[in-house]
Amino acid sequence: MARAMDRREFLKRGGAAAAGLFAGRPFRSGRPRPGRRPNVLMFAVDDLRPELGCYGVEGIKTPNIDALASRGVAFSRAYCQQSICNPARACLLTGLRPDTLGVGDNDIPFRRRAPNLVTLPQLFKGAGYHCVEVGKIFHGTLPDPRSWSRPDPEIPVREAYMDAATRARQEGREATARRQGRPEGWISAYLRGPATEAFDAPDNAYWDGAVADAAIGLLSQLKDEAPFFLGVGFTKPHLPFIAPKRYWDLYKREGIPPAANPFLPHGAPAFAMNGLSELAAHEDFVQVPNPAEGRLDEAQARLLKHGYWACVSFMDAQVGRVLTALDRFGLGEDTIVVFWGDQGWKLGEHGGWGKQTNYEVDTRVPLIVSAPGRGKAGAASPALVEFADVYPTLSELAGLTPPPGLEGTSFVPLLGEPGRPWKSAAFSQYARGFTYRFMGRAMRTDRYRYIEWRDVIDGTLVATELYDHASDPQENENVAGGPERRDLVRDLGAQLAAGWAGARPR
């Protein structure tokens, strides 16, 4: 277990570990050695939408993730099952959907309903793999020690903000709240410091840089304990948008494009959108006018998007450091690498700054799989795939038999034939409205996003949304109403009712 170091020691020692913004050469990916079971290196990233160069976003600097995509297959239409951390991650790591798990928010443990289920890393552990995580893989407040071969290494960085005045102010406010009897959950949720910070500090003075250090240390040990399953979880670009200043300096704020649709979808039910979401808890955004719609002025919007991009580039550099170490230790040719973001995030689209909706911008996620000797390197697949599919896919790639009852489909065939016909739909859900009175169930087909909202008490249909991606890829106009689409809405409703089992590839 790593020895805890204080902040000053980290600041002194961090320069060598972060000598360059994007240090290291791209890792090698080839064919696994005969008779050797493949390792698995899984990157999980918090609140990362497909805001990456390899996903066609111009101007953003993500050379390491782009290099990974050039050696694997990037899925351009991958979807989480619920756009919030715990349900999204639980679905991916169990192969089960939110209704089956009974998980709908960040406070419900996925083992509550199914205590003996076998998670993805637990399956590998049972097959003789050495399974270790560092950083955030399962939801941070709901870890699952049963999934891993040994406890997580200690990460000696705890502070979010580097500026001393900011830290002192935040610590004082938190101390006052505790004296008032405020619970810790309230303090962490509603009493947050500034939404952004750019400070001149080494990468590993921050959590994600220290996670990368720990991951590299684990790889140096695991190279002698193969096969292994290593989960590496980075928190950025989750709020607050804090990264070393040099990553902010990669961008000119005036050159970062703001959202093209900073307004609510026309014709959508008012409760479907979530406005400022968690942004409103930060001290510099608590008094933003009209928080229900999340309207910010242009300077605020550009600041936040600048911060998001800086954090994405910071995280990308940490991914590069780990992949370089994988190569340095001679493990690249024997390791499956999978990279995913747990849900999308609005950067002003629909007037929102956060996740937690059923729209494309919150449910679509980056997903990249590089499997040595399998698939077309550098390909992009437009197939509809889901988080529930990752468990059976990695099981098949490693030659393991997953437990019965998984609710996803292995997409291994797409690695070799990325454009082949595949699922007819992907499914997501989110409850909204006052006290989450309405459950929204969303279905993404090749052309449409269809959403039904039903009262959770009696199942009454209270609203319907339909977005035509052929003419409206940003989902700005709900076209569910009108007699000309009555038959289409009826057919999509029947397809939604058939669910994921009815959408599996033929």
Image (cartoon, rainbow, N blue to C red):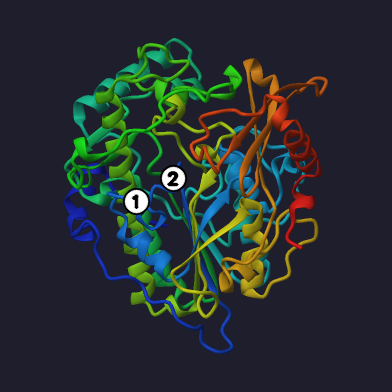
Vertically, is 416 above or below 201? below
Furthest-front residue in this view? 484
Tell me if I can see residue 265 in this picture.
yes
Viewer-nearest residue: 492 or 309? 492
Which structural element holds mark 1?
helix
In the depicted view, which residue is nearer to us: 228 or 284?
Answer: 284
Q: Are marks 2 and 1 in contact (CB under 8 Å)?
A: yes
Residue 26, how many percent across, how many down? 32, 70
Q: Residue at x 45, y 81 (%)?
A: 30
Left or right: where 375 falls relative to 27:
right
Left or right of 411 in this view: 252? left
Q: Quadrant of the C terminus?
A: bottom right
The front one of 282 and 123 is 282
- Considering only order in the chain, which callout, 1 or 2, is on the residue closer to the N terminus? 2
Q: Quadrant of residue 71?
A: bottom left
Residue hosting label 1: 315
Provide residue 140's location: percent of width, then percent of height: 51, 41
Give the image location of residue 314, x and y in percent.
Answer: 29, 49
Mark-to-mark CA distance, 2 and 1: 10 Å
The amino acid type found where label 1 is placed reads Met
Residue drawn at 70 percent across, 45 percent down: 97
Q: Is residue 231 left or right of residue 204?
A: right
Residue 169 appears at what percent x and percent y? 26, 20
Q: Which residue is mark 2?
A: 48
Q: Specify the farthest residue to the right.
A: 458
Neighbor class of circle 1 (other Cα within 10 Å; few <14, some 14-19, many 20+) is many
Residue type of the residue flagged with mark 2: Leu
Q: Nearer the viewer, mark 2 or mark 1?
A: 2
Whether residue 116 is visible here, answered yes or no, is no
